Amino acid sequence: MKKLALLFAGLSLFVATGCNDDDKEMEYPLVGVWQPLKEVVTTVETGEDPVSDLITYTDCQKEGRWRFNSEATGKVTTNGEIGTTPQCTILSDQNFTYTYDRSAKTIVIKFQGIVEPSNGKIITLDDTTLNLSLREETQDPTVYKTRTYTMRRIPQ
C-alpha cells in the first residue's frame, strides 16, 4: 500500500511539474523602426464586392520609416521623388501617439494635427515583418476603406 501511495505521489509531482509554456507563441515587440515595402488599399461599398489595389513602393519610398517608440509615441517619415530629374527627398514627417492592445492586436494611432484617430489592427507582427491595417474615414457612410502596410524591421 505504501508503494502505491508513493507511486501516486510521484506521478502527481511529475504531472504538476511536467507542464510548461514552451509551446506558447513568441511575442514580438511593436517598438522599433520599420521600413515600408508596399501597401494595399481595399475599398468596400455596401452591397458590392471589395476592390483592392496593390501599391508597390519605389526604392525611394522604401527609404521612408515608421518608428514606434516605447513611450507610445512615434513618427512616420514619407519619402518620394520630386522634380523633373527625380531626386529622393523627405516629403513629410508626421508625429503620432498610439495605443496598442497586444492581446486583441488592435491599435489606435493619433497623428499630430489630425482630429480623428486611425483605428487599426496588427495583422502580422514577428521578428522581421509588420502588417498594419488602418481604417480610413470616407465622406460616404456606405464606403469603407482600409490601408494595409507591409513593413520590414530595421535592426538597431
Image: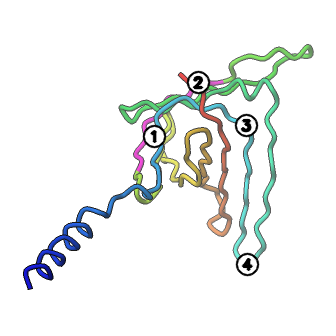
Which numbered disc, 4 or 1, marks the residue that appears first in the sequence? 1
Residues at discs 4 and 1 in contact (Cβ within 8 Å): no
At x 76% / y 67%, what residue is drawn? 50
140 part of magenta stretch: no
Viewed as shown, does residue 129 lie left or right of 53?
Answer: left
Q: Amino acid at mark 1?
A: Pro
Give the CA separation, mark 4 to mark 2.
37 Å
Residues at discs 3 and 1 in contact (Cβ within 8 Å): no
Quadrant in the picture for residue 145: bottom right
Label 1: element kind: loop
Residues at discs 3 and 2 in contact (Cβ within 8 Å): no
Q: Amino acid at mark 2?
A: Asp
Give the CA separation, mark 3 to mark 1.
19 Å
Which numbered disc, 3 or 1, marks the residue that appears first in the sequence? 1
Residue 28 position, x and y percent, is 48, 43
Viewed as shown, does residue 104 lie left or right of 150?
Answer: left
Q: Which residue is mark 3?
A: 37
Q: Which residue is mark 2?
A: 93
Which numbered disc, 4 or 2, marks the residue that appears first in the sequence? 4
Q: Is residue 53 above or below residue 140?
A: above
* Nearest-to-viewer mark from 3 and 4: 3
Q: Which residue is mark 1?
A: 29
Q: Residues within 10 Å of mark 3 (few under 14, many from 20)?
A: some
The magenta segment is 92-100
Q: Residues within 10 Å of mark 1 (few under 14, many from 20)?
A: few
Q: Which residue is mark 4?
A: 47
Give the CA separation, mark 3 to mark 2.
18 Å
Label 3: element kind: strand
Q: Is residue 125 above or below residue 3?
A: above
Residue 35 position, x and y percent, is 65, 31
